Image (spheres, grey):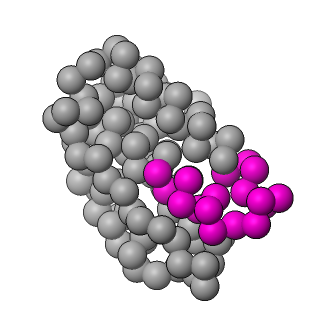
Amino acid sequence: MSLSWTAPADVLTEGAEPGWAGIWTLTHAAARAALHLADALPLIDALDVIYAAADLREAQDKLEWAHPALPARCAAVDLGPLDSGDGFTRGRLVLDQLTTAALNRLFAIGGVVAGC
């Protein structure tokens, strides 16, 4: 995988705002990354990633319903298309990194310890 995904994902997971704004930004980036990853995979391999993208988008919709101002004030990050010559495994790792960062912010809001 090129640095076009890994470096921005590192910056995003480290620098996204705490709270709902950071969760929205990370969820949006993860949903877009999942769609780009699915586009780069053969259909049979892309199905689970397509379902993940749909679930992430549904989570984003629920965030927007609960906090309508989020889309207007949060960074809508798109990592761009995945180069088909890049490693799909690393693309999945970036997707995992983004979703884990969003969940960790959610756990911090709820006072829940990650991994429990």
Q: In the rendered image, is residue 107 in sight?
A: no
Q: Which residues are magenta?
A: 32-49
* Image quadrant assignment for residue 52: top right
Q: Position of residue 96 (x, y in %)?
A: 55, 53
- Which residue is most to the left? 73
* Image quadrant assignment for residue 69: top left
Q: Identify the residue shown where x is 29% and y is 29%.
A: 20
Q: In the rendered image, is residue 32 in sight?
A: yes
- Which residue is most to the right? 44
The quadrant the C terminus occupies is: top right
- Magenta segment's dominant SS is helix
- On screen, residue 95 versus residue 20, left or right, reads right
From the viewer's side, name the closer residue of 90 and 48. Answer: 48
Q: Position of residue 8 (x, y in %)?
A: 33, 66
Q: Identify the residue shown where x is 35% and y is 23%.
A: 64
From the viewer's side, name the closer residue of 3 and 79. Answer: 79
43, above or below 101, in the image: below
* Residue 57 is a magenta residue: no
* Residue 38 is a magenta residue: yes
Q: Position of residue 17 (x, y in %)?
A: 22, 42
Q: Position of residue 51 (x, y in %)?
A: 68, 41
34, above or below 51, in the image: below
Q: Identify the residue shown where x is 42% and y is 41%.
A: 27
Q: Identify the residue shown where x is 40% and y is 43%.
A: 28
- On screen, residue 52 versus residue 99, left or right, reads right
93, above or below 109, in the image: below
